[in-house]
Image (spheres, rainbow, N blue to C red):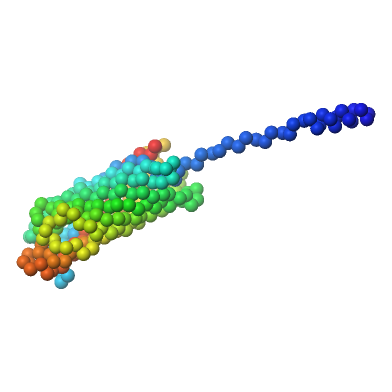
Amino acid sequence: MLALALCLLAAAKHTPPPEEPVETPIEVPSPIPVGVLIAWKPTILSVRVDNGAGSQFGSDKLQLFRGLARYTTTAFNEKLLARAEIEGGQFQTDTQKARLGSNGVDVTVRLLGGTATKISPGFTITGSAGLITRYQWGTEAASGAPRIGLLGVTSNAEFELRVAPLITLSLFLEGGLAPIPYAAQPNLGVLSDASEFRFRLQVSIDVGTSTAVDIGYDFTRWHASFAGTTVLGNPNPDQALLLEAREHAITLGVRWKP
């Protein structure tokens, strides 16, 4: 018996310890919403022109020929967001009995960088900042859409909440300053300040593994003020000029996700 016990003890000393299970890392997809969006944006465009003493021109008109294209990708091993966006189209104001009426167009371009953070399995916050530029021009030098380009910086934040397996709600806020004018008609005077604000409330519906339909309300406000203008007919450049454009748009888009 003693010999058997010694043999069992010796065998136990030479038995290798059990191997620990191999851990397999699980790849967590980036929360950055990459993909391409193409959207139609029928818009109610409200334009106001003021010299500081009262409104000189006002127009509220439906613009059917407006659209949006957006491309979003990642950089630095999917840690950063990179986005390019272009939107614009018809910029028509009331031309009946109004010297300032216009049949113009406008285009806005954004180049942005940022990141996205998943707060919970169904809640994501995306933020970005970068350059913004807008150019608008009308059919006449003195018009509701005068020729002017604006260049500046902007930043935004988007809050996305998945309320159902295929449905996501999002709230988007953006604010920008565009203090640098370019290619502007001379009689506008000197740009004092220019700003942009955008708000969007949207619902996204997944209709496939890589396709979603976006439906939302989009509000954008552009404001610019000038000093020493003669665009309203005053030969002496001592007037102020306030330009404001408000866009109330319905966004109907298709988004492709890789």
Q: Is residue 245 above or below residue 239?
A: above
Q: Quadrant of the N terminus?
A: top right
Q: How many marks?
A: 0
Q: Is residue 21 above or below residue 230?
A: above
Furthest-right residue in view? 1
Question: Is residue 134 rendered to the left or right of residue 57?
Answer: right
Residue 128: x and y in percent read 37, 52
Q: Residue at x 13, y 69 (%)?
A: 239
Residue 107: x and y in percent read 22, 49
Q: Residue at x 13, y 61 (%)?
A: 188
Quadrant in the rendering for residue 77: top left
Q: Relative to the observer, which residue lies in front, 50 or 27?
A: 27
Q: Is residue 230 above or below residue 140?
A: below
Q: Residue at x 26, y 46 (%)?
A: 86
Residue 75: x and y in percent read 40, 42
Quadrant in the rendering for residue 141: bottom left
Question: Is residue 197 rendered to the left or right of residue 137?
Answer: right
Q: Quadrant of the C terminus?
A: top left
Quadrant in the rendering for residue 240: bottom left
Res. 172 visible in picture: no
Res. 53 visible in picture: yes
Residue 63: x and y in percent read 20, 51
Furthest-left residue in view? 235
Q: Is residue 191 above or below residue 89?
A: below
Q: Residue at x 35, y 39 (%)?
A: 256
